[in-house]
Image: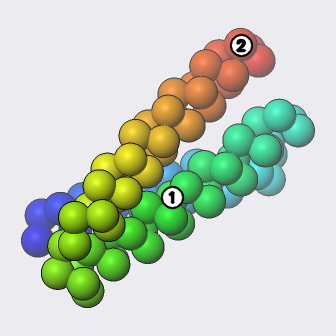
């Protein structure tokens, strides 16, 4: 249950970040914001699939891989945001 609550909080925070980037940033960051939102929605979909399908190995592994991609995207956004300053 704790993972689901943390996931919901993360969903809200990262979605707000992605939306603000897509609406307010320059073209390069807007593209990364769209990528971030896409990966976030994929991650949530895989998380829901894990619950509904009772944790099949392939979906669980995909959920972990997409989590790593989400972290990589957030790190890239942070780098480009710092470079833009």
Q: Is residue 57 left or right of residue 29?
A: left
**From where the camera sits, is residue 20 visible?**
no
Tell me what residue is drawn at x 61 percent, y 57 percent.
Answer: 37
The image's mark for residue 62 is none
Tell me what residue is drawn at x 53 percent, y 66 percent.
Answer: 41
* Label 2: how many Cα within 10 Å (few below 14, some 14–19, many 20+): few
Q: Where 23 sits versus 83, above or below?
A: below
Q: Is residue 46 left or right of residue 51?
A: right
The image's mark for residue 40 is 1
Q: Where 21 sits versus 7, above or below?
A: above
Q: Is residue 70 left or right of residue 83?
A: left
Q: Which residue is mark 2?
A: 83
- Contact between labelled residues 2 and 1, with CB atoms less than 8 Å apart: no
Q: Residue furthest left?
A: 1
Q: Position of residue 45 (x, y in %)?
A: 43, 73
Which of pointers 1 and 2 lies earlier in the amino acid sequence?
Answer: 1
Q: Position of residue 73 (x, y in %)?
A: 56, 37
Q: Is residue 41 left or right of residue 8?
A: right
Q: Position of residue 38 (x, y in %)?
A: 62, 59
């Amino acid at each position: 249950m704790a993972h689901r609550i943390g996931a919901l909080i993360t969903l809200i925070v990262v979605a707000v970040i992605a939306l603000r980037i897509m609406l307010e940033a320059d073209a390069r960051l807007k593209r990364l914001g769209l990528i971030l939102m896409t990966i976030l929605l994929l991650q949530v979909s895989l998380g829901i699939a894990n619950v509904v399908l009772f944790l099949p190995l392939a979906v669980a592994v995909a959920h972990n891989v997409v989590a790593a991609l989400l972290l990589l995207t957030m790190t890239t956004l942070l780098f480009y945001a710092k470079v833009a300053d």
